[in-house]
Image: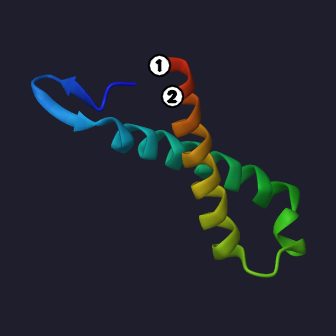
Amino acid sequence: MPPELDVYGVFVPSFFVIAIIAYVLTQALIGVLARTGFYRLVWHRALLNVALYVCIVGALFSASQWLSS
């Protein structure tokens, strides 16, 4: 993935785009986990949500690097 994306003349860092996509995916996953009752098994819900977000950002960033090479 190029380091910057041109969006109507505005250069946006590619990491920002990855972070936005990861946020949307994390919110969807949080909804699924809440509906299934998974959070009853979790000690610290906010910590799990942050960890999920970081894992998804890392996976998307690795995938974008792998696809661009």
Q: Residue at 87% of width from left, 63% of height from top?
A: 37
The image position of residue 5, as x and y in percent, is: 26, 27
Q: Which residue is mark 2?
A: 64
Residue 32 appears left or right of 17: right
Confirm or deny contact between disc 1 and disc 2 (CB under 8 A). yes
Disc ID at residue 5 = none
Q: Is residue 17 left or right of residue 69?
A: left
- The x and y percentages for residue 32 are 76, 50
Q: Amino acid at mark 1?
A: Ser
Q: Is residue 4 left or right of residue 31?
A: left
| 14 shown above or below 29 | above
Residue tagged 1 = 68
Residue drawn at (87%, 55%), measured in percent from left and top? 36
Residue visible at 83% across and 74% down? 42
Residue at (51, 28) in percent of width and height: 64
Residue 1 image point, x, y percent = 40, 25
Nearer to the camera, 46 or 64 = 64
Q: Going by the picture, which residue comes out furthest to the left? A: 9
Residue 17 lies in quadrant: top left
Query: What's the CA distance linking mark 1 and mark 2?
Result: 6 Å
Horizontal side of 61 relative to 55 (left or right) equals: left
Q: SS for tag 1? A: helix
Question: Is residue 41 placed above or below 56 in the rendered structure?
Answer: below
Rate crowding at label 2 as few (under 14), some (14 to 19) or many (20 or more) other CA atoms within 10 Å. some
Q: Secondary structure at mark 2?
A: helix
Q: Residue pushed farthest front?
A: 69
- Residue placed farthest to the bottom in the image? 43
